[in-house]
Image (cartoon, helix red, strand yellow):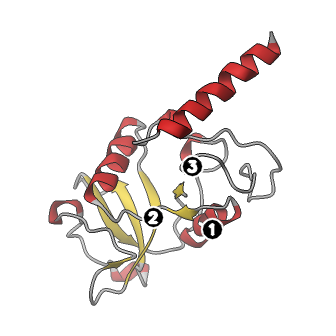
């Protein structure tokens, strides 16, 4: 019975990984292996395209550098929202999971654009601007109505902790 249940679970994961066109809770890989990634499961390269850390136990608090390193240790990178379709899908995922925020792999130079940049439509970027009391705000996060402005990209001080989405 246990073997059958494990096979059904594995078959479902493989089917999702092969047919994955959008994000969903079922697109999350089941991670096996050690626990040497800052309290989060760490398994080396994963078979799926995305790893959504807020769906994993104890994996909701990373600085942006820690998020980037965690993704790299899992053979992935922190998500880059280079298309509007990809950004909008992650925004839907954020709202559906009632998640307040997550890190992207992006940085802001405050002279030009987000890099590696989301090509966000203007309504997706925040107009709140850098808050000088926080110091340098060069890391890009997506916030879900954190400042009563809807789901938007924000430049945030990199020391804040948030979950992330890793991608292949």
Disc 1 to disc 2, how far (Cα)?
12 Å
Quickly name the residue at label 1. Answer: 66
Mark 2 falls on what kind of element?
strand
| The N terminus: image quadrant | top right
Point out the tag, 1 or 2, that comes first from the N-terminus. 1
The reply to whether residue 119 is visible in this rendering is yes
Relative to 44, residue 115 above or below: below
**Foreground residue among 114 and 162:** 114
For this orientation, the residue located farthest to the top is 1
From the image, state whether disc 2 or disc 3 is nearer to you: 3
Point out the tag, 2 or 3, that comes first from the N-terminus. 3
- In the displayed structure image, the side of residue 122 where residue 55 appears, left or right: right
Task: Choose top left, top right, bottom left or bottom right for residue 127.
Answer: bottom left
Q: How many marks?
A: 3
- In the displayed structure image, the side of residue 47 where residue 39 appears, left or right: right
- In the displayed structure image, the side of residue 81 where residue 27 appears, left or right: right
Quickly name the residue at label 3. Answer: 51
Residue 23 in the image: x percent, y percent?
43, 42
From the image, state whether disc 1 or disc 3 is nearer to you: 3
**Foreground residue among 6 and 37:** 6
Disc 1 to disc 3, how far (Cα)?
15 Å
The reply to whether residue 145 is visible in this rendering is no
Quickly name the residue at label 2. Answer: 104
Point out the tag, 1 or 3, that comes first from the N-terminus. 3
Residue 97 in the image: x percent, y percent?
43, 37
Residue 111 in the image: x percent, y percent?
28, 90
């Amino acid at each position: 019975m246990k073997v059958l249940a494990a096979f059904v679970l594995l078959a479902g994961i493989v089917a999702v990984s092969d047919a994955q066109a959008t994000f969903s809770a079922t697109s999350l890989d089941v991670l096996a292996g050690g626990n040497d990634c800052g309290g989060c499961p760490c398994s080396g390269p994963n078979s799926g395209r995305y790893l959504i850390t807020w769906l994993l136990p104890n994996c909701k608090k990373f600085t942006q550098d820690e998020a980037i390193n965690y993704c790299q240790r899992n053979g992935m990178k922190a998500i880059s929202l280079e298309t509007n379709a990809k950004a909008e899908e992650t925004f839907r995922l954020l709202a559906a999971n009632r998640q307040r925020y997550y890190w992207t792999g992006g940085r802001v130079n405050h002279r030009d654009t987000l890099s590696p940049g989301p090509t966000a439509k203007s309504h997706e970027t925040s107009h709140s601007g850098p808050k000088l009391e926080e110091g340098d705000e060069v890391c890009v996060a997506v916030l879900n109505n954190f400042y009563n402005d809807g789901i938007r990209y924000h430049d945030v001080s990199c020391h804040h902790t948030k979950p992330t989405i890793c991608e292949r």
